[in-house]
Amino acid sequence: MEKETKAFQRVYTKLFQLTKATVSLHAKGIGYDELAIVDGRLAQVVKIMEDLVTLQIFGGTEGIATNAEVIFAGKAPTLKVGDDLAGRFFNAYGEPIEGGEILGEEREIGGPSVNPVRRKQPSEFIPTGIAGIDLNNALVTGQKIPFFADPDQPYNQVMAMVALRAKADKIILAGMGLTRDDYLYFKNVFDNAGALDRIVGFINTTEDPPVERLLVPDMALTAAEYFAVEKNEKVLVLLTDMTLYSDALSIVSNRMDQIPSKDSMPGSLYSDLARLYEKAVQFPDGGSITQIAVTTLSGGDITHAVPDNTGYITEGQLFLRKDSDIGKVIVDPFRSLSRLKQLVIGKKTREDHPQVMNAAVRLYADAANAKTKQENGFDLTDYDKRSLDFAKEYSEKLLAIDVNIETDEMLETAYELFSTYFKPEEVGIKQQFIDKYWKNNKN
Amino acid sequence: MNTIGNVTGIIANLVIVETQGTTAQNEICYIKHGDTRLMAEVIKVVGNKSYIQVFESTRGVKVGTEVEFMGHMLEVTLGPGILSKNFDGLQNDLHKMEGVFLKRGEYTHPLEMEQKYDFKALAKKDDKVVAGSWLGEVKENWIPHKIMVPFTFKGEYTVKSINKDGEYTPEETIAVLTDREGKDHEVTMTQKWPVKVPIKAYKDKPRPFKILETGIRVMDTLNPIAEGGTGFIPGPFGSGKTVLQHNLSKNAEADLVIIAACGERANEVVEIFTEFPELDDPRSGRKLMERTTIIANTSNMPVAAREASVYTAMTIAEYYRAMGLKVLLLADSTSRWAQALREMSNRMEELPGPDGFPMDLSAIIANFYARAGYVYLPNGESGSITFIGTVSPAGGNLKEPVTESTKKVARCFYALSQARADSKRYPAIDPIDSYSKYLEYPEIVEYLNKTIHENWTDNVFKAKDILLRGKESYEQINILGDDGVPIDYHVRYWKSELIDFAILQQDAFDAIDASSSLERQNYMLQKTLEVADMDFEFESFEDVGPYFKRIINALKQMNFSDYESDEFKQNEKEFRNILKEQETAGKEEEVTAEEKAS
């Protein structure tokens, strides 16, 4: 394989055009998407017009001269996959950061999609202990879901916590524009938990060129597919931060003179993101790829092109918000949603789970209305006051991200709160559940 | 002799091909990449250069690669065997593809050409026939699948011979037709048709005059869609579009449901694959999958095939409509299709229209919606395509090109509201912003009053009015405060909440509540209006909410029980008892008032 590739290699030394992210040159017999080395830097073919080939240079074009050496590899970008990947961290090109070699089979990254009829419906509940997730937004293997969070929120910490509790066979961290501090944080947390042998990392930090990030998710997902398909493992992929990934997309499309769409993002943003997120899958043989991503927002604005397109692709989103009443970060029950929760709640969890979840959120909404009334200086009814008290305790005992309890306990806690503050008919759940689970001791 | 060309340029899935011969707009061609053939469609021709959009990844394609032009547009194969299948956007049978991953350049046949179908002739020798005339029928699942004169046939033909009843494969000749010039044409059970051309093998297309029952109260009661009508559902993500579409496909009263999953999540399609073969069709008692066909171009499948997927779905719907069937076509989401058009327009460096979409976007959408409709067939029978598309407006903003273009052509507008979704009032269709133009059709009003109840439409408008007045009262309460308004405002608000909770909200995941018959909808509407017509006396505004919540709870428990079951009646009794408390209170008032008067 190696020799054959070498035979295809062609070397050129005259560049026709240079921009910040691309170079163009006259060359023949070049395939679309093909990889090349320009002055020692990795590049990929993004456009061919007659014999004029445009290459995107992942490391940026600083200092590249018009007589730079261009070697075409005759193949698309690849990653060597094998059990050797486990416990190691790689750069965007799939090279071990600590040095050394990887033994394994060479795979093209960004491979084909799974035939939808060969997928299996996700059905395995992933308990995380966080009630804001398990009770209101249960996660399922094969799901893809992002955290929508402002940059000042502790999303990487929550993600690391979820990853460690999720009982995955492999955790693959795809870091895009990760600060070096956060990279070391992840490494430490996984190390302290004794989970390092289950981790594979592909890391592009803020110290690295931004365009390199474009390779990171494909590298991570190629590794994930290896473990999920070949080893039938449950793989959890952490993508942080997809907004910075999208920024890199817009840089490249801008350099290629494409007409920008909403928020200066390329018109193909939806397809570009969907291609990655849709790699989340439950295979029939037990292997699965679950994705938890981070999309950073600017001032909570979810109408920006990146969170907006993401929301249409992913199976829900988890919204972190600081609740000033209790001084903790909570999983916002209004804006958060897990689309696959219906597949497990009330089925893999207790039968009354869906109704309890909905009732609690509805009462929490009543409290939000009462709060608006209060802020506008109106008198509160008795019901308003009760719902406000309920909301505070609900937030503290169930929504806060520092909660770590079993799902049944979450349901019991919910009934405790219901019976403390409300009558059964105010809660509005099916009579049969009221009969069975309602806490009568307090009424 | 097919035209041959060579690749001269590649930008993602746009490929430029230089040819010596003739090429046509929308012509299909294949790029010979190594051992595989990559399917593509001509979208622009300049001089001897054809611009083609490739339905596959172009990774590795080189300048100089040979391209063969096929001399026809993108076609689907129509014949028995389409039902219950899962196709990709180009009508490849996904089940016939090998391996877990889709292989580039693998194309599979949509039908079962080996299978024998039990043919029964409907036409006889010397019959005069036209395109779309029924020559015979075969059983496909439970549907009598009509074998028709190919839609490409022009003018009148005479049946020269027709096969005896018996078993034939889809490729065998089943009839010979003679045209006016005396030339003979052999007809099989299958035919091909270009997807971008509407099938017009019908005699007349009247205004829709019946409604299509969906089982979803907020649609059927407040804003019904006509059989053969068009509607669209715009909504931000997380507002319940998908659940609503799935519920429509499960419960709508159609013979066939065709779902075009266009650029959406693969797991949603898997949900249909997994659940529909298990679920019973409440009307026929058969499995839901037997009436469902899925065209899946999920968001990770090639972008160019997204456009093809909606046209493929529409063409299949038209084919079954020509058999006299009632077809429901759902497309989720038409925005993804528009985005695919935008990506291509961008690569071709066309001058962009609003938000970067191509200038002819509105026209494309209008033409597509116009293909739906109720039709009378040449033999006097009727068939229909009811089309409902979803729209995914960027940032939930309804003032964007796809929503606006669709609003101009679709007759029903089901606006999903973020606020309703946030407070878990599902289905989150906004009762005030949404509309159905069909309620303005006298023929529909007449139909509704005749089939449901003589006062039905009056009651519907009354309910709408209560909802509107309730909203106004609510706004007043919010501005002036609970005690700053007369108690009447609270009553008015709670009367609208009653309709909201008992009629508008519906639990799609509850076995009973998920679908509601028209009879039942009428019953519940009358119950809520009965309350709305009552006068209430309350000491304080604080008593209004708790009282109404008890009524709401009783009506909700009715929604959760089987219609007219003991449980249902028990809850109704409870409802009556709650009302009685006020009736007696009211009567005492009346008595004292009368006494005073006398």
Image: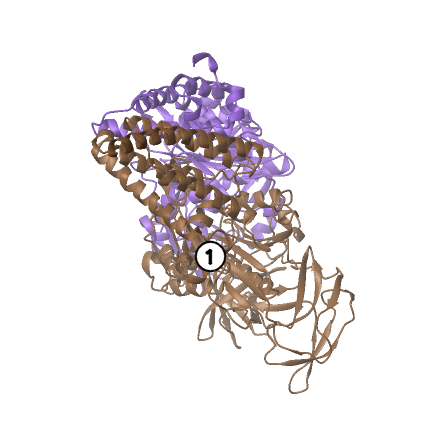
Residue A84 in picture, x, y percent from top left: 58, 31
**The N terminus of chain B sits in image quarter:** bottom right
Residue at left 59%, top 74%? B152
Residue B540 in picture, x, y percent from top left: 27, 26
Give me the chain that's purple.
Answer: A
> Residue B231 or B523: which is nearer the viewer?
B523
Instruction: Tell me: residue A391, above or below residue A20.
Output: above
Q: In this view, which residue lies farthest toward the front?
A: B598
Residue at left 40%, top 47%? B235
Name the secondary structure under disc 1.
Answer: loop
Q: In this view, which residue lies farthest toward the top?
A: A441
Rendered image quadrant of residue B469: top left
Instruction: Tell me: residue A139, above or below residue A19.
Output: above
Residue A113 in picture, x, y percent from top left: 56, 47
Q: Is residue B87 left or right of residue B492?
A: right
Q: Is residue B54 left or right of residue B97?
A: left
Q: Colour of chain B?
A: brown
Asked whether residue A14 appears in the rendered view, the answer is: no
Rendered image quadrant of residue B525: top left
The kind of residue on which mark 1 rests is Ala
